[in-house]
Amino acid sequence: MSRRSPVLSLVGISVVLCATTAFTTPSRPARSAPPARAAAVPAVPTASTAPKALVEEAVNIDWRVLAGLDYTNGKSTDTLKKLEGKLVRIPGFVVPLDDFQEEGAEFLLVPYYGACVHTPPPPPNQIVMVEMGGKKAVKLNLFDAVWMSGRLKIASVESPYGTVGYQLEGLKVEPYSSK
């Protein structure tokens, strides 16, 4: 005499119940289509109609590209010239312009932790003066690397930490990741 497992028989019952339920569920009445509306569909932005900010992708650049500026005579590489006014994304560390400043709309971006704080500053082609668009204050954390996105301008500026080779209209600050 064979014995059936109570678990197996319960599983079999639930499969039968599910199968019969699927076939015995009352059907719903068909819905009528909504009335057609002329010109109710919004236009999808294309490269020619979308705002520039939606179409343009930020170009990831690193400090070797920025080193293409000869700060002694103001000449720069062709690659760097092509980035003038473009939306770029640069990794780096934030340096507040005032000691102990925790938030701000203006700050420096440098390639390594601690630059400009207690050591001689990097050369001007390795410092970016950032001014956030709309004077929007952002959190300034010295210890964490960030990705800084904005419009690049090759322009010499004096800062409390020395001469700066670049200006950036900051649009976005995000935590650094290798992506």
Image (cartoon, rainbow, N blue to C red):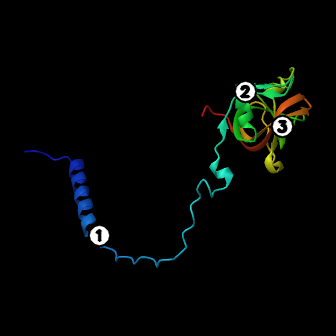
- Label 3, on which residue? 107
Assess whether mark 3 and mark 2 are in contact (beta carbons under 8 angstroms): no
Q: Amino acid at mark 3?
A: Phe
Q: Residue furthest left?
A: 1
Q: Amino acid at mark 1?
A: Thr
| Label 3 environment density (alpha carbons within 10 Å; few <14, some 14–19, many ≥20) | many
Q: Is residue 39 left or right of residue 150?
A: left
* First-in-chain label (2 vs 3): 2
**Is 74 situated above or below 151?**
above
Q: Nearer the viewer, mark 3 or mark 1?
A: 3
- SS class, disc 3: strand
- SS class, disc 2: helix
Residue 119 pos. (x, y %): 86, 20
Q: CA distance from mark 2 to mark 3?
A: 17 Å
Q: Is residue 69 left or right of residue 41?
A: right
Q: Tell me the number on the disc at residue 25.
A: 1
- SS class, disc 1: loop
For the N terminus, give its image quadrant: top left
Identify which residue is drawn at 23% across, 64% down.
Answer: 20
Q: Nearer the viewer, residue 70 or 63?
A: 70
Q: Tell me the number on the disc at residue 63.
A: 2
* First-in-chain label (3 vs 1): 1
Total labels: the figure holds 3
Identify which residue is drawn at 83% across, 44% down.
Answer: 105
Q: Is residue 22 left or right of residue 175?
A: left
Identify which residue is drawn at 72% across, 27% down.
Answer: 63
Q: Quadrant of residue 13?
A: bottom left
Q: Quadrant of residue 121?
A: top right
Residue 176 pos. (x, y %): 67, 34
Residue 96 pos. (x, y %): 85, 35
Q: Amino acid at mark 2?
A: Trp
**Is 83 situated above or below 4?**
above
